[in-house]
Amino acid sequence: MDNNIRELRAGRGLSQGQLGDALGVSRQTINAIETERYTPSLPLAIGLARFFGTTVEDMFHVDENGRRA
């Protein structure tokens, strides 16, 4: 699933570790989400959206057939 977490994180000048600490997850989890190797749980996706002041739909992109947009 495509996402723009890396761009949002970099725009705030945060490292993966800093973002992970803010959300209670590891740096490796943030890296896996950014590289699209891991789709976060709904609570984590909502936490990311709240942290960045956006919506889950604006952060993660899937077309109506479930394929990457």
Image (cartoon, rainbow, N blue to C red):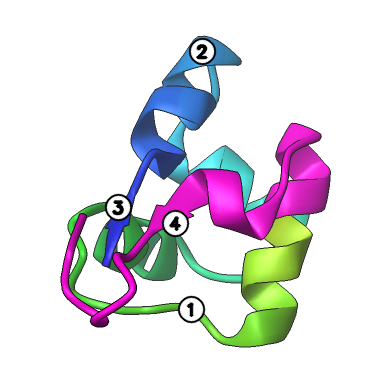
Near mark 3 (Cα within 10 A), the count class, few <14, some 14-19 or many ≥20, is many
Q: Which residue is mark 1?
A: 40
Q: Position of residue 53 (x, y in %)?
A: 81, 34
Q: Could you say whether the residue bearing mark 2 is in a helix, strand or loop?
A: helix
Q: Which mark identifies residue 34?
A: 3
**First along the sequence among labels 1 and 4:** 1
Q: Which residue is mark 4?
A: 60
The answer, for residue 23, to whether it is visible in the render is yes
Q: CB under 8 Å between callouts 3 and 2?
A: no
Q: Position of residue 6 (x, y in %)?
A: 36, 35
Q: Which mark identifies residue 11?
A: 2
Marks 1 and 2, how far apart at CA = 21 Å
- The residue sitting at 17% across, 74% down in the picture is 67
Q: Quadrant of residue 4?
A: top left
Q: State which region is magenta.
A: 49-69
Marks 3 and 1, how far apart at CA = 10 Å
Q: CB under 8 Å between callouts 4 and 3?
A: no
Q: Could you say whether the residue bearing mark 3 is in a helix, strand or loop?
A: helix
Q: Could you say whether the residue bearing mark 4 is in a helix, strand or loop?
A: strand
